[in-house]
Image (cartoon, helix red, strand yellow):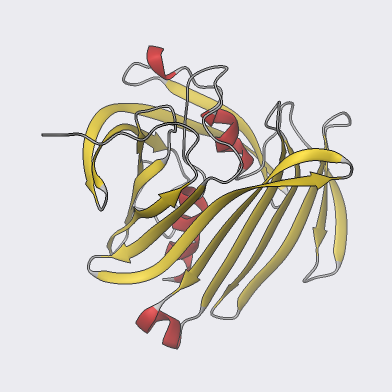
Amino acid sequence: MKKYILILLIFLTTFSFAQENHSSFDTGEWFKFRIHYGWFTASYATLEVKNETLNGMPVHHIVGIGKSSGLLSAFFKVEDYYETYIDKKEVKPYRFIRKINEGGHTKNIEINFDHQKKEAFVIDKKHKTKNTFATKSNVQDMMSSFYFLRNNINVSSLKKGDEQFVNMFFDNENYLFKLRFLGRETIKTKVGKISCLKFRPYVQAERVFKEEESLTVWVSDDDNRMPVKIKADILVGSIEADLDAFKGLKHPFKIVID
């Protein structure tokens, strides 16, 4: 269960998209999600955009937090923290932090990006190691990748089957992330029916996911492109994350009226 929750939180805190040359988010944006396996609530997660200065530069400080709740918390405690500091104009990462504790399985990693040198300086605070790795051009971290896409995908011209790619650096490796557009769909949520864009992120099929195409993501089909729902098919069923609450949207929010 701990791997299922972690992987879902990773994807939950990142999926949103918007029109080219258009800013869909700003300081003060906040989301809360309920992560559940059927009727059983496993965890809650929040995602917030803050205003901050890093090394003298104004940045968006984005913080994602996931914690176990209820019965799960009693026998398997989960506390996951993800942070990224991104340039406000270019949406590129300067620092990424991943600090997790899942039933005693812990990681505490900080990555600092040098875009001119195309390097990532990785500090593993748990194992007390420091290493430098080469990165690809226009590299993004796990969270900044999708804020970058959020401001650069031209949704108005999207056609079913269209794919997008991003160079991503995670922990100590470079990845080429791929995303496919599946079409449009209306989703029933706690706050009403929302018109959504439906995407499929491609993940490696290993011990958790059934196959490469096991994740599906729905985001609002408006200028906010906020994450609405995620479904992950796993070996023993499926786990879902649903939008539970939100505030601080940059653009007006619309629901579908029957």
Farthest residue, direction top: 157
Quadrant of res 162: top left
Give the x, y percent position of residue 96. 72, 50
Closest to the observer, 41 or 55: 55
Farthest residue, direction bottom: 74
Closest to the observer, 136 or 247: 247
Instruction: Report the side of 42 relative to 109 (left or right).
Output: left
Number of callouts: 0
Instruction: Report the side of 65 relative to 215 (left or right).
Output: right
**Residue in view at x 34 percent, y 16 percent:** 159
Give the x, y percent position of residue 139. 70, 33
Instruction: Report the side of 131 relative to 70 (left or right).
Output: right
Closest to the observer, 198 or 106: 198
- The quarter in which the N terminus is drawn is bottom left
Vertical comparison of 132 with 134: above or below: below
Closest to the observer, 196 or 255: 255
Give the x, y percent position of residue 7. 48, 57
Farthest residue, direction left: 258
- The quarter in which the C terminus is drawn is top left
Give the x, y percent position of residue 30. 51, 50
**Residue in view at x 43 percent, y 57 percent:** 32
**Residue in view at x 27 percent, y 49 percent:** 191
**Residue in view at x 80 percent, y 67 percent:** 125
Vertical comparison of 134 with 211: above or below: above
Vertical comparison of 100 with 117: above or below: below
Quadrant of res 212: top left
